[in-house]
Amino acid sequence: MDVSQRYRASWEGYWRETSDAPGEAIWDADPSLCAVPHSELMLPYADATLPVADLGCGNGTQTRYLATRFARAVGVDLSHAAIGHARRADPAGAAEFEQLDLVDGVAVRALRDRLGDTNVYMRAVIHQSEPQDRAAVAEAVATLLGARGRAFVAELTSASKAVLQQAVTGPGGPPEKLRRVFAHGLKPAGATDEEVPELLRAAGLTILASGDTALPQTEHLPDGTRIDLPARWFVLARA
């Protein structure tokens, strides 16, 4: 099974029209706001001598930080254009990057076979996946973990919709970076609050720890307030 052609084209189009400039993508926050605190939540449960796979890595900003905390870091993304951004931003080769459709179970298992038991970092992927693909994304996490890997998953909650609505209805309409997301047919905050933990458990994952957080964006409201989207985080292992 693969993602739909429409969904694939949306992401390719988005990343092709995004420059290499840091923060140009609305979710491309500095690692100090994302991968740094997320690693502190994950590492008490994880074996850092195992690799880490950053699922939905985009331009690789978080992956490059994860490479400083784990023995090996591999960023994967559906979009070939995103992987191009990631490789250009990492000329020293601190991390590895490859195109991967998380819904393609055969490809996910092949990555697992190459890496062995793997830690997983996944930030805001389930919520924007198409409804029919969300279970497969959760199953990809479980496949990669094997017996010893641990996962950190953060997903937007329904409260983020109110924040996005506030941004959209400002005097000038949606901020430019958010407007580009909508222009490509991408739909943030699509999953319900109950759906995410249910999908994770159905994939054979056990929740070791969880909590509330916010995912900082690189865009601001008209009053200058940074857009921080309410989210829930989970540290997971195979059941």
Image: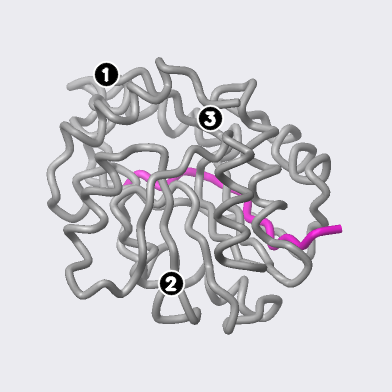
Query: Would you name the residue on which mark 3 appears?
Result: 129
- In the rendered structure, the answer to whether residue 71 lies left or right of residue 86 reads right
Vertical placement of residue 202 versus 65, above or below:
above
Which residue type does callout 3 highlight? Ser
Look at 65% across and 57% down and name the residue there.
144
Vertical placement of residue 126 versus 113, above or below:
above
Cα distance in 3D space between marks 2 and 1? 31 Å
Q: In front here: 114 or 55?
A: 114
Vertical placement of residue 218 versus 112, above or below:
above
Query: Which mark is in front, 3 or 1?
Result: 3
Cα distance in 3D space between marks 3 and 2? 23 Å
Residue 171 place in picture, x, y as percent: 21, 21
Q: SS at mark 3?
A: loop
Query: Would you name the residue on which mark 1 appears?
Result: 183
Question: In the rendered view, how is the structure colored?
Answer: one colour
Of the numbered discs 3 and 1, the one sitting upstream in the chain is 3
Q: SS at mark 2?
A: helix
Q: In front here: 150 or 176?
A: 150
Look at 53% across and 68% down and name the residue there.
52
Query: Would you name the residue on which mark 2 appears?
Result: 66
Q: In front here: 17 or 25?
A: 17
Q: Main secondary structure of the magenta part?
A: strand
Identify the magenta region.
Answer: 226-239
